[in-house]
Image (cartoon, helix red, strand yellow):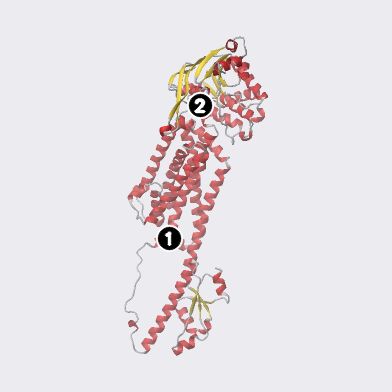
């Protein structure tokens, strides 16, 4: 379970007299239960990535609360990271290492036994159809291949919670389908999954719960059907995120 | 500690697969070290050898048997100059001065007429300067001899010619003559530590961020200090490897050169090597930490290179400072990184006694500097502006 309550975060931009504070997140709240996929939907710059970074303990919130599995992200960052798998916006693979070595590095950092992580990697390689990639250096990988390796790396410790920032960015249709299949598989195993997106179809195809974020605030949440209220989801989203004028 | 080891092993594998790492190691250790030493050694021994041999080239020696006789008595070896010596001197093939004797020299000398010798040289080469000075000295000595013989034949004391004499007393210890050489060896070894550290230091900090791999890395449940420690280990390993290769190159070159001149100029045996290691290894560790800290502020690889180059410049420049300012060795210099190391190592090469305080002070300061840099880095890795480059 991931719980976010009235989260706020602002950044300082510029220097000296031109310095100003820009609020990235001003009031975001949502609850993502276990065994469900929760989508943060919002336009670019709505505060989705910042919210996810706070959850991943990489940023400190200015106000509000964020809990992962009942643990406060600011009070117990190491314990939160241990129960969390994150696919960040930057996939961040080491080009001179093979896919297997990339995964092995994180497995070792998390103190996993060799047999444990190798078995998990074999299973994920089957689910994501990436057996042929494992022993190649990742330098020349395509966007889809990089996503698969980064995802396998994020899941190597079998975390109870999974956070994905724009996971389908730049993916072709086959990679997108592989990703969706894996996320549904993980949902059936009772994982708590949160992902951010600005693509309507993506959200419609995957999410059990939808949280619409705009201008740093939660403007609506509920099932996609409830939010669409009988109409098209896209119309509802545009009305909620950009106001009636749009 | 296990985390630091994991980071170390991964970064080591990563660095070893980077062609840049190998280029740096090869170029710095093979080119900078032994080659420059060999060049200098041959330069020094050539000068000394030609001066010691006092080989004098004479053109038309058969016209001046008296001169040949004097030169032989003075211990010089007289050889006939090649016919085209002027050309050879001009294009640098012949570095020695040549004494040219005109056909009627001996006759004019006997008659007391204006007798002339020519000393032909091209002093654009350093060796030619030494040779022409030596030849001129010999000719002056002969001049004095002839003059005093003439005075004595007329019953006048030759003492009148030299009312006082000058005795040269050089107070500099004999080994100080190789000042440039003494300067070069520690300086190159210190540069080696910077050169060895720089590309790896940037790769594990700014490079990690530019690849976007810093963010995922920090989401592992590991303390920042362990990550920093592991990364520093690899940078220090690379720096130390280049220092060791450079020193090994010097030691090897010393074996090959076997020049007495060089041996007289500086000492570089097992004891000196041990002191070099004791001084340079902490310095290499410090440079690794300092370069990482500077590179961590860079938003990109390129920006990090700029910051790191400031440090390279300081290490280049600080040891030269005393040469330009004619500073004498002073205790405060021990407290300045690079300068302190340079001072201690140059003294060791000169064969001077170096006490424990001088040996320990630069090392202790380097260690303290390393710890401060690593602590700052661990803090930086938790700072949002560094992780997300704001």
In front here: A84 or A207?
A: A207
Tell me the crowding category of disc 1: few under 14, some 14 to 19, or many 20 or more residues within 10 angstroms, Cα based.
Answer: some
Counting from the top left corner in percent of width and height, residue B111 is at: 45, 90
Q: Is residue B166 above or below residue A63?
A: below
In front here: A167 or B136?
A: A167
Tell me the crowding category of disc 2: few under 14, some 14 to 19, or many 20 or more residues within 10 angstroms, Cα based.
Answer: many
Q: Is residue A200 above or below residue B335?
A: above
SS under mark 1? helix
What residue lies at 48% left-to-right and 35% top-to-bottom? B230
Counting from the top left corner in percent of width and height, residue B183 is at: 43, 55
Q: Is residue B301 above or below residue B330?
A: above
What residue lies at 58% left-to-right and 22% top-to-bottom? A198
Residue under circle 1? B178
* Residue at the extreme front: A245
Asked whether residue B53 appears in the rendered view, the answer is yes
In front here: B153 or B215?
A: B215
Q: Is residue A93 above or below residue B28?
A: above
Asked whether residue B9 appears in the rendered view, the answer is no
Q: Is residue A134 left or right of residue B223?
A: right
Q: Tell me the tag on residue A207.
A: none
Q: Tell me the tag on residue B219.
A: 2
Chain letter for mark 2, please. B
What residue lies at 48% left-to-right and 64% top-to-bottom? B45
- Quadrant of residue A11 within the rendered picture: top left
């Amino acid at each position: 379970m991931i719980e976010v309550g009235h989260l706020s975060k602002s950044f300082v931009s510029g220097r000296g007299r031109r310095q100003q504070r820009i609020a990235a997140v001003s009031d975001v709240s949502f609850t993502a239960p276990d065994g469900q996929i929760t989508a943060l939907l919002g336009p670019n710059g709505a505060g989705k990535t910042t919210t996810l970074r706070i959850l991943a303990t990489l940023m400190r919130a200015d106000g509000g609360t964020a809990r992962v599995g009942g643990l406060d992200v600011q009070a117990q960052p190491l314990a939160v990271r241990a129960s969390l798998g994150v696919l960040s916006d930057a996939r961040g693979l080491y080009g001179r290492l093979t896919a297997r070595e990339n995964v092995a590095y994180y497995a070792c950092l998390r103190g996993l036994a060799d047999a444990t992580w190798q078995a998990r990697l074999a299973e994920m390689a089957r689910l994501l159809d990436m057996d042929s990639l494992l022993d190649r250096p990742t330098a020349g990988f395509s966007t889809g291949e990089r996503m698969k390796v980064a995802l396998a790396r994020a899941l190597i410790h079998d975390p109870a919670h999974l956070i994905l920032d724009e996971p389908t960015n730049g993916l072709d249709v086959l990679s997108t389908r592989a990703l969706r299949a894996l996320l549904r598989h993980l949902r059936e195993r009772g994982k708590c999954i949160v992902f951010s997106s600005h693509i309507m179809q993506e959200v419609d195809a995957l999410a059990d719960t939808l949280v619409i974020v705009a201008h740093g605030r939660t403007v609506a949440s509920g099932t996609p059907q409830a939010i669409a209220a009988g109409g098209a989801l896209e119309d509802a989203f545009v009305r909620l995120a950009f106001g009636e004028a749009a | 500690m296990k985390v630091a080891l994991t980071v170390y092993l991964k970064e080591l594998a990563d660095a070893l697969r980077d062609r840049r790492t190998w280029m740096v190691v090869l170029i710095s250790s093979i080119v900078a070290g032994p080659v420059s030493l060999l060049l200098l050694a041959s330069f020094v021994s050539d000068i000394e050898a030609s001066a010691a041999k006092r080989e004098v080239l004479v053109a038309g020696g058969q016209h001046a048997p008296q001169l040949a006789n004097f030169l032989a008595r003075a211990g010089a070896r007289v050889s006939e100059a090649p016919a085209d010596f002027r050309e050879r001197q001009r294009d640098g093939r012949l570095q020695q001065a040549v004494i040219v004797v005109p056909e009627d020299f001996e006759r004019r000398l006997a008659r007391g007429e204006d007798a002339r010798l020519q000393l032909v040289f091209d002093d654009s080469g350093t060796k030619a300067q030494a040779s022409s000075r030596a030849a001129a000295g010999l000719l002056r000595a002969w001049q004095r001899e002839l003059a005093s013989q003439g005075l004595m034949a007329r019953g006048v004391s030759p003492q009148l010619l030299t009312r006082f004499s000058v005795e040269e007393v050089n107070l500099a210890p004999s080994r100080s003559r190789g000042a440039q050489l003494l300067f070069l060896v520690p300086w190159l070894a210190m540069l080696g530590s910077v050169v060895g550290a720089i590309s790896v230091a940037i790769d594990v900090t700014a490079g990690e961020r530019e690849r976007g791999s810093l963010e995922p890395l920090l989401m592992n449940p590991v303390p920042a200090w362990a990550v920093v420690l592991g990364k520093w280990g690899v940078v220090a390993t690379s720096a130390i490897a280049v220092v060791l290769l450079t020193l090994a190159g010097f030691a090897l070159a010393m074996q090959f050169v076997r020049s007495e001149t060089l041996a007289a100029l500086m000492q570089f045996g097992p004891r000196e090597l041990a002191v070099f290691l004791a001084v340079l290894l902490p310095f290499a560790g410090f440079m690794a930490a300092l370069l990482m800290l500077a590179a961590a502020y860079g938003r990109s690889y390129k920006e990090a290179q700029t910051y790191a180059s400031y440090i390279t410049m300081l290490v280049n420049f600080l040891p030269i400072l005393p040469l330009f300012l004619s500073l004498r060795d002073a205790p405060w210099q021990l407290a300045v990184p690079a300068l302190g190391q340079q001072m201690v190592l140059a003294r060791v090469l000169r064969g001077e006694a170096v006490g424990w305080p001088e040996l320990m002070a630069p090392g202790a300061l380097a260690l303290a500097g390393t710890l401060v840099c690593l602590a700052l880095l661990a803090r930086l890795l938790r700072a949002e502006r560094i992780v997300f480059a704001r």
